[in-house]
Image: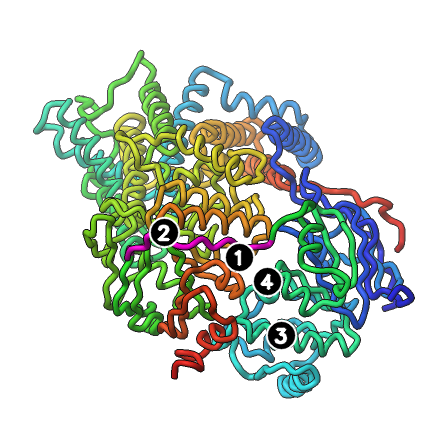
Amino acid sequence: MDNKIAAVTMRNITKRFGPTLANDRVWLNIYRGEILALLGENGSGKTTLMNMLSGIYFPDEGEIAIDGRPVVIRSPKDAFDLGIGMIHQHFKLVDVLSAAENIVLGLPGKLDLKAAAKKIREICAAYGFEVDPDQKIYDMSVSQKQTVEIVKVLYRGADILILDEPTAVLTPQETDKLFAVLRNMRDDGKAIVIITHKMHEVEALSDRVAVLRQGQFIGDMPTGTTNAQEMTNMMVGHPVTLNIERPEPVNPKPRIEVKGLTVRDVEGTLKLDDVSFTANSGEILGIAGISGSGQKELLEAIAGLQPVEKGSIEYIADNGQREQLLGKDPLAIAEMGVALSFVPEDRLGMGLVGNMDLGNNMMLRSYRKGRGIFTNRKAPYKLAHQMVDFLEISTPSVETPVRRLSGGNVQKVLVGREIANAPSVLLTAYAVRGLDINSSYLIYDTINSQKMRGVAVLYVGEDLDVLLELCDRILVLCGGRVSGIVPGRGAKKRDVGMMMTKLGGNSHE
Amino acid sequence: MNKKTKTPLFHVAKRAALPWYRAWAIRGAALLLALVLCGVITSLVTGEDPFAVYGAIWKGSFGTTRKFWVLLQNIAMLLCVSLAVTPAFRMRCWNLGAEGQALIGGLACAACMITLADKLPNWAVILCMVVSSVLAGALWAGIPAFFKAKYNTNETLFTLMMNYVATQLVAFFCVVWESPKGSGTIGIINPKTNIGWLPQFAVQKYLLNVLIVAVVCVLVYIYLNYSKHGYEIAVVGESERTARYVGIKVEKVILRTMLLSGAICGLAGLLLVGSTNHTLTTTIVDGRGFTAVMVSWLAKFNPIGMIFTSFLLVFLGRGAGEVATKFGLNRSFGDILTGIILFCIIGSEFFINYEIKLTRGAGKEG
């Protein structure tokens, strides 16, 4: 490998954001015919580094060479001209246009959709993609949209591809497909960089790993010569244990009983169809499913945020008293004495206010406390200080707007506030999405400690490995219906994956 | 690719939060730059001595005691309307109807002064004026707010259109109440009896307005920053979804805040008609409803900061007028100077949020 000329050489790259050093004299080589996994915790500078390669940021110091020739990348267009294409976490597609239209959008020359479609089909055939050039984006699943993004950069002649956490939104089956085409592209001599947090994906896919920590380049090695434990230690900087605990539930009793829950969205599409289950105290009930299978609606219905067509959601207190939660808003539910905490999927869009500081965000749950027209500002700031210590939130101060924090720290603020409420029911949606290993394990521990307190936890997750390790029972949703409920201990990943795509999976129908 | 790539000379990078004194230093430098620029342009275009022009701008506001009080009065009225729009703005609800809301408040005030003058004692007339002005202003903001809360209509267009309705209503009543007959204007209301004229403090005609607005300013500041309502406004403004998530009734907050916004506008109308002018015309609010938008934004919706921004705008406006009369220039020249100064001040915000970094080894071909 050493005698190959690197497709990309990044030398001594430094990037500052104000006082924060996002990249500190990073050296990185990217080779053709190789899949490089770029590893690092949140805020370690992976995305920043790749953004400089794709022309979104400009480095403060250092130089970049393509095929040994120094270049200056000032804009995404420069990057494209050099054959560098990046697939971002958030897709940049126009919903009302077709795949082909999106792919040729912005390209110079005459618009010839037929020729474009033909070329798209060729690309698809070459690497094993499945894209219908005439399909509209709004009709596509997340995985199809991602495919369009990849085809888009290939269409423009990119031979250096960067993928930022491409599997975060995919099912296991879709992930396998994606990996297959990435391998095809590698064998075709393209250079591929994949940013990910998931160790088993790194091991399954990459040829080489490079680790960043706190903006610095820690090291790189062939994937075959290392293992998950070693990579994790390098990322974190000290040894960590990679096991998720799963204590036995203590004295589980029904806490939330959902019967025949049916939800339609504003357009009348069925989002939840006759969903029934019971969540027990002292137990983690995992909820698995392809994204958009009704997880969001289910949690929001329980939290009092989602209008429901029919069904029943009952809260069963410790003394056996039943309360109907349907038709009540979050305030009414809280006033009934039901301590319900909710960690929503969209942290800054729903759970927190990005422009407010930590203290003010803590106040969201508590500002009504106390009589009089004024808010008590001391208590929430005190709570914020406690949370910063307890959950090791890294923030300049409790007066920092939360949108300035990294994803993991934002999530800690949200989870911290929600558990500070001493809940009896805890709803979490994608609690570790985008979080690094250290933060993820801290969140698992926190959720486990809530379970041991006797809280009924609903854990909507996307990483099946984690669901299988963490949850006592797993409810699988498929297209808004309950595909089955399996015990977490002993369930097979393959079976749960099947249940996600087909009602009842293989074994039940 | 054979073309030579040049390293750019500089690039723009986002700054971390600046300490307040450095931010103000940048703003101060912008003001200084603006003054120098104004001076250069003045001497180039008109041949006048720039320092004489600066002097005229200064004299426009501080030349005589009377001018000084007019300055204070204008600041107070502009600030009052700005304070009115600010709660709505903090909620990201763009109330552009302050002009109409103040005008309709003034109309209600004038209506009480004219129709109740010979029916009720003076104190009762004044009480009616206060109540009806505030309610009228609140109603004028409440109508668009109701439709926004209920049907999510666009408050910007709705409030803007309500301005025209208010102007036409006032035009109509100017004819109904015209005095003397045939003039089409109302003239001074109750010139002999002074019924419904708000009392004067310490013989200074404008002191009452200034004091009332100062109190309102402090109250709005406290309301927005320390009350539960103020917190709800901030949350709704930042994210409606988060507000619903914590059980805030968004519709109620929108309605309540807009009613408050309109009520303060109504108060401004009361002061303009009942205290300052003792008459009603369609132009009595004098565009303050729109200038207030700028005042509020420039101060980043901070009521205390708005004292300074409204001072700045009124000061520049009066200076522009003085320059025009003193040097026999077109009034527009004064406006040009105002424009230059505002451009520099607003532009300076860019340098507070971003910095220009020189690239190392710039100019070298790579």
Secondary structure beneath label 3: helix
Q: For the residues marked 2 and 4, what is the alpha-carbon distance in whole angstroms?
A: 40 Å
Q: Which residue is mark 1?
A: A433
Q: Which residue is mark 4?
A: A89
Q: Is residue B6 left or right of residue A254?
A: right
Q: Amino acid at mark 1?
A: Arg
Query: Which circle, 2 or 1, is nearer the viewer?
Result: 2
Q: Which residues are magenta?
A: A242-255
User: Residue A38 placed where, x, y %?
Assistant: 71, 59
Q: For the residues marked 4 and 3, what is the alpha-carbon distance in whole angstroms?
A: 15 Å
Q: Quadrant of the C terminus of chain A?
A: bottom left
Q: Residue at x 42, y 27 (%)?
A: B75
Q: Is residue A82 left or right of residue B318?
A: right
**What secondary structure is the stretch in magenta mostly built from?**
loop
In terms of sequence position, does the residue under pointer 4 or pointer 3 come before the other?
4
Could one spot residue A2 in this view of the protein? Answer: yes
Secondary structure beneath label 4: loop
Q: Are marks 4 and 3 on the same chain?
A: yes
Query: Which circle, 2 or 3, is nearer the viewer?
Result: 2
In terms of sequence position, does the residue under pointer 3 or pointer 1 come before the other?
3
